[in-house]
Image: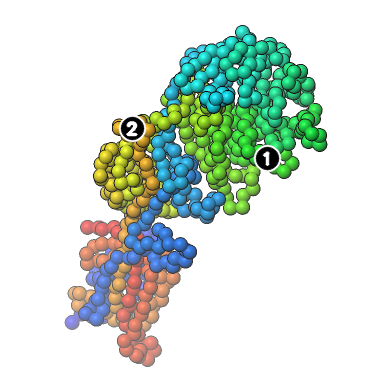
Amino acid sequence: MAGVVSRLPMTISGRTATPGAETYALEGTRYDFALGGMPFMSAISDDRPYSVSMAPIRKDQFDNQREPGEQSLANWWLRSQSTFIGGAGLLYQDPDQVQVANLQNKHTIQYNASVGVNPWVNGQATLLRQTSQRIVDASANTQFLVGWSTSAGVDNYWSAVGAVLKSDDGTTITTVTWGGANTIRSLTSDGTNYYAADNVQVYKGAGVAAGAAFVATGTTNVVARWVKGRLMLALDNKIYEVDAAGVKTLRFTHLNASFVFTDFAEGTNAIYASGYAGSQSNIYKLTLDTTGSVPTLASGGTLTTQLPLGEVVYAMEAYLGTFVGIGTSRGFRVGQIDSNGDIVYGPLLFAIAAGVKGVAAYDRFFFVGATNAIDGSSGLYRVDLGQPIQDSGASSASVRFAYATDLQAHANGVVGSVTNFGNSDRMVFSVTAVGSYLEDASVLEATGYLQTGRIRYSTLEPKLFKFASVKTPTTYAGNLTLSVTDPTGGPTSIISISEGSGVMMTDIALAVPTTAAEWIQLRLDFGRSTVSTATGITVNGWQLKAMPGSVRQRIFQVPFLMMDFEKDMTGQIIGYEGRTAVRLEEFRNIVQAGDAVSFQDLANNTTTSVVVDDFKFEQKANPGTNKTVYGGYLYVQLRSIADVITS
C-alpha cells in the first residue's frame, strides 16, 4: 500500500518561475493540470465535466439611436456610404462625433481621394467633363484669362500671353489688336471692355475690337482689376483708383518701397489688396464711403489680414459678399468677411507645392488652380462653399469646406490663371508654356476613380473583410472596376463590369486581403460609355461587410480537486491535514493579481496563456476538528489568450 507523503512546502517542487506566467514541470507526482505553476489533480466526472467553448466575439449592446442604421444590424460589421458631397481628404472612414451642416457624420459623406470624378450631386458620383486645349503657347510667359460674353450671349474668354491678346468662343480664336507691343502684365474686364496692362500703359478695348491707351503704368509690377465698379491699379507698392477718363488717383502707398501688390478683391463696403515683401504677406482694406449717392473710395489702407511667415498671397477671389478665396505659396485658404469688413481666414484647406496662382468662382464653388497636383498633372480643385466640414461649434475662422480635384489638363506646368467661360457653367484655365484649356460642354473624361478612406471599424484589431457591394443603376452606361488596397499593398482588382452588363456588384467576395487585416480601402474606377461620350458610369453608394479577425478566445470550464489528501493516477497519495486551506489561499493570490497565467494540460503536454474569469470552491463535507478534512472541488473558468503547444 502506498504511503502518505508528508507536508509540502509552499513552493511546490517542479514549479518554474517565468515573468508573467509560472509553469510547472512534472516530478514524481502525476498531476493532471497546472495553473500559474500550481499543480492540480483532475476532478472530472459525469457530474463535473471539463468543457471548452468559444468566447463570444460580439458584446450585447442597446441601440438607442432615433433612426435605424448599421448599428442596428446583427452578425456583420458593416460600413457604407451613399453620398460623396463631403469631398476628399478623409484618411479613415470611421464614425466620429464631428457633425457637418446636414447633421451627418463626416465618414458618411467624405472619402479619401478622387480624380476625374464629380461627387457634388447628392447621392451619386459620376465622371467630370473633359477639357480641350484651345490656345496653344509654348512660351514661358504667364497666361492671363478673363471670361466675357457678347451682347448676343456668345460665351468667350480673353487670353493674354506674352505680347499677344486673343479671344476664344470655343470654336473660333481671334487675335485682338490691343494697342501695346510689350509683354502683357495683367488683364481684367468690366464685363464689356478688356483692360490689358503692360509696363507702359493700360490699354482699353471692347470685345475683339482694337484697344487704345487708357492710363500710364511705368513699371513691370502691374496689377489691374475691375472691382466695385471701378478700375484699381497697383504699381509696385502703390495703389491707384482710375476713373472713366483714365485719370488715376493715388489711394495708398505702402511704407516699404519693396512691397509688391499681387491682387485685388471686393467686399460689401471695401476693396482688398494683397501683397508681400520678402517672406511677409498681408492683405489691406480700402474702405468705401457710402454716405453720398455714389460710394467713394477713401484714401489710405488698413491692415486687415496677415499671413503666416513665409506664406505669400498670389491670388484672391471674393464671392457673394461673404467668402474670399485666398491662393498662396503654400496652397489654398477660405476667408470670410466679418461684420467689420475684415477678412478672417481659415486653416490651409489643401497644400499645393507650387502654390495657387489662380482662383475663380461659380454657383457655390471656388475653382482653384492646381499645379502638377492631380496625380502629377495640372488642373483645378473645386471647393464647395455650401458644404462646411467643421467641428461642432467651430468659429468661422476654423471652418473647413469640402473639396476635391476637378478639371484636368493631362499636362504639366504652372496653372497661372482660372476664369469662367462667359456666363456658362464651364471653366477655363491656363498652363504656362502649354496653353489654355476649356471645359467641354458635354464630353466626359474617359476614366476616373474614387477611393474611400481606410475602413477599419474604429479599431486596430484585425478584421476579416468578406464582401463588398456597389450600388449603381440597373443598366451600365460605361464600365466600372472595384479594387481593394490593404496594408500590404494594392490596389488589387476584384471585379470589372462592362457596359450593358446585367451583372450587379452585390455581395462580391473579396479575394484580398487573404488574411485578417487592420483596414482596407475600396477603389472604384469609372469608365466612359463607348456608345456616347456624354454618358458614363454612375455610382450611388457602396457597402462593406466584415467580421472580427482576432484569434478567437476559448472558454475553459475545469474542475480541480482541492482536498487535504489526494491520489494521482499511479495511486500515490499526497497531502496533509490543512493542505486545502493553504492551497486555496495560494490560488486566491494567483487570481487576485489579475495577470495572465499559464494553464497546463499536463497529460496532453499543452500550455495556454489564460486569464481567470471566475472560480467557485465547493466543500462537500463538514470539516473535522482543527480544520481537518477541509476540502472539496474548485471550479475554474478560464479565457485563453495564446496557445503554446510543447512536445
- The residue under the point 79% across, 34% down is 293
* Residue 476, position as x, y percentages in the image: 30, 41
Residue that badge 1 annotates: 337
| Residue 478, quarter of picture | top left
Which coloring applies here?
A: rainbow
Distance from label 2 to label 1 (Cα)?
45 Å
- The residue under the point 41% across, 76% down is 585
* Residue 178, position as x, y percentages in the image: 61, 12
Report the number of numbered marks.
2
Tell me the amino acid under the disc marked 2: Ser
**Residue sitting at the far top:** 181
Figure check: 253 above or below 476: above
- The residue under the point 36% across, 51% down is 543
Q: Nearer the viewer, residue 321 or 64?
A: 321
In the image, 97: left or right of 194? left
- The residue under the point 68% across, 12% down is 213
Q: Nearer the viewer, residue 29 or 609?
A: 609
